[in-house]
Amino acid sequence: QAQLKFTHLFGYEMKELERLTSKKTGANRNLNTSTEPSKEYVLKSMLPAKWRKQFVDQPGDHAPRAFCLTVCSLVSISGGQVEEDMLWRHLGSLGVHAEDAAHPKLGNTKEALAKLVKQRYLIREKLGGGAGNN
């Protein structure tokens, strides 16, 4: 009954998923966790494709979305964490450079990366040792 109301009021379908390990962030990330399943929920839009194309998927959103996907993929395949210098090296091989203040699609690339941190796609942590790396 709640699922029906959620779909009719908000236009989303809610699905429950079970994961064997829970995700940790920050200092607790490397600690062993129990293997008990944890529940996660995923929202799926019920908006028809025609309306989604007209009102949601705007052409100007494609480059920032692709940048987000690329950065998150690079972090993921690097084991869940990567030094910022290494991330910029990988992005540089794709034509996106840290010093680029006027990228044709992203604008200031450092600000684009900072926006991903602000939107919580990434967590920026200072490394120990005083080297100034993130």
Image (spheres, rainbow, N blue to C red):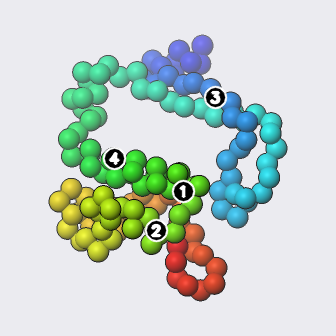
Q: Looking at the picture, does residue 69 appear above or below residue 112?
A: above
Which residue is found at the position 48% from the left and 19% from the top?
7
* Residue type at tag 1: Ser
Choose top left, top right, bottom left or bottom right for residue 11: top left
Please name which of the two marks, 4 or 2, marks the residue nearer to the observer: 2
Residue 130 point in image, percent of width and height: 59, 86
Q: Which residue is mark 4?
A: 65
Q: Earlier in the sequence, mark 1 or mark 2?
A: 1
Q: Earlier in the sequence, mark 4 or mark 2?
A: 4
- Under circle 1, the secondary element is loop
Q: Earlier in the sequence, mark 3 or mark 2?
A: 3
Cβ atoms at labels 1 and 4 below 8 Å apart: no
Q: Which residue is mark 1?
A: 78
Q: Looking at the picture, does residue 67 appear above or below residue 41?
A: below
Is 78 on the left or on the right of 113, as rendered? Answer: right
- Under circle 4, the secondary element is helix
Cβ atoms at labels 1 and 2 below 8 Å apart: yes
Q: Which residue is mark 3?
A: 17
Q: Which residue is mark 2?
A: 86
Residue 31 point in image, percent of width and height: 77, 57
Please, which residue is most extreme toward the left here? 104
